[in-house]
Image (cartoon, rainbow, N blue to C red):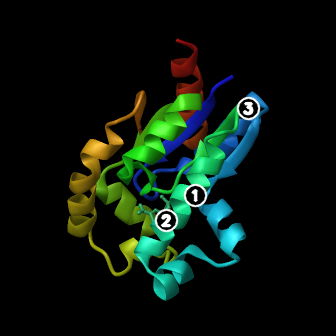
C-alpha cells in the first residue's frame, strides 16, 4: 500500500487526523516535526530561535528524504514541507498527497493560546490569511483536498478513507 501523506497549513489537524487514520487502517504513523525534534533533540521553536528557519528547512528536507522511502505509513508533514518541490516530488513517489485546509479564522482560533509555532507568534487573522495566500499554490499541488473547518477528527478520517478507496 502507498503512504498517505498529510500536508496543509499549520493547525489544520494533520497530526490528530494522521494518528486516527493510522489507527483505523492499522498502519504506522510518522510525523516529520517529531522526527526532526528527536533527531536534533530540540523543540521546533528552539531550532527556529537558535539555528534559524533555513537550517530547519535543510533538516526538514533530510527527514523527508528518509520518510519518503517508507511504505504503508501515514506521514504527517510540517506545514512548510510543500514549499520545497523536491520534498513533494519525493513523497509522491510512494504516496498519495492529501491537503487539509481550514479558514484563517479557524486556524487563528485553534492556535490562539499555543506558543509552539514560531511562524505564528503574535499573529492575527490577517497575517494568517496572507501566509495562506502566499502558500496556496503549493498546497494545491495535491491529489485530494479536504476542508476541515466544521468536521471532527473522526469525520475527516472517514472522508479520507472513502476518497482513497474511490
Ligand atoms: C511550519 C509548520 C510547523 C512546523 C514549523 C514550520 C510551517 O508544523 O514544521 O513550525 O512553515 O508551516 P505544523 O504544520 O505541524 O504546525
Residue 121: percent from left, percent from top: 38, 79
From the viewer's perspective, tell me whether residue 80 is left or right of residue 68. Answer: left
**Mark 1, secondary structure of its residue:** helix
Residue 47 placement: quadrant: bottom right
Question: Which residue, given by chain and number where applicable, does mark 1 sit on?
Answer: 62
Return the mark for residue 24: 3
User: At 42% across and 74% down in the image, what residue appears?
Assistant: 53
Q: Nearer the viewer, mark 3 or mark 2?
A: 2
| First reached walking from the N terminus: tag 3 or tag 2 | 3
Extreme residue in the bottom direction: 50
Q: Can you tell which mark lies on residue 88?
A: none
Above or below for 75 versus 32: above
How would you rate the neighbour count of disc 3 (Cα within 10 Å): few for under 14, some for 14-19, many for 20 or more? few
Toward the viewer: 115 or 74?
A: 74
Q: Position of residue 103 (x, y in %)?
A: 31, 50
- Give residue 19's position: percent from left, percent from top: 68, 45
* CA–CA distance in space, label 3 to label 1: 29 Å
Residue at x 59% of width, y 24% of height: 161
Left or right of residue 63: residue 11: left
Residue 26 in percent (x, y) is at 79, 32
User: Can residue 148 be seen in this snapshot?
Assistant: no
Q: Is mark 3 within 8 Å of ligand 1?
A: no
- Left or right: 93 as drawn, with respect to 66: left
Q: Which residue is mark 2?
A: 58
Amino acid at each position: 500500500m502507498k503512504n498517505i501523506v498529510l500536508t496543509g497549513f499549520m493547525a489544520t489537524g494533520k497530526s490528530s487526523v494522521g494518528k486516527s487514520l493510522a489507527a483505523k487502517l492499522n498502519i504506522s504513523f510518522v510525523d516529520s516535526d517529531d522526527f526532526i525534534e528527536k533527531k536534533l533533540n530540540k523543540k521546533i521553536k528552539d531550532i527556529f530561535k537558535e539555528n534559524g528557519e533555513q537550517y530547519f528547512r535543510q533538516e526538514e528536507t533530510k527527514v523527508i528524504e528518509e520518510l519518503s522511502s517508507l511504505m504503508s505509513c501515514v506521514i504527517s508533514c510540517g506545514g512548510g514541507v510543500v514549499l520545497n518541490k523536491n520534498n513533494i516530488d519525493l513523497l509522491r513517489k510512494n504516496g498519495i498527497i492529501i491537503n487539509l485546509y481550514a479558514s484563517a479564522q479557524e486556524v487563528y482560533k485553534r492556535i490562539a493560546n499555543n506558543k509552539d509555532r514560531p511562524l505564528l507568534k503574535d499573529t492575527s487573522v490577517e497575517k494568517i490569511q496572507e501566509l495562506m495566500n502566499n502558500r496556496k499554490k503549493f498546497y494545491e499541488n495535491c491529489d485530494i483536498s479536504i476542508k476541515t473547518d466544521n468536521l471532527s477528527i473522526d469525520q475527516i478520517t472517514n472522508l479520507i478513507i472513502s476518497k482513497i478507496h474511490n
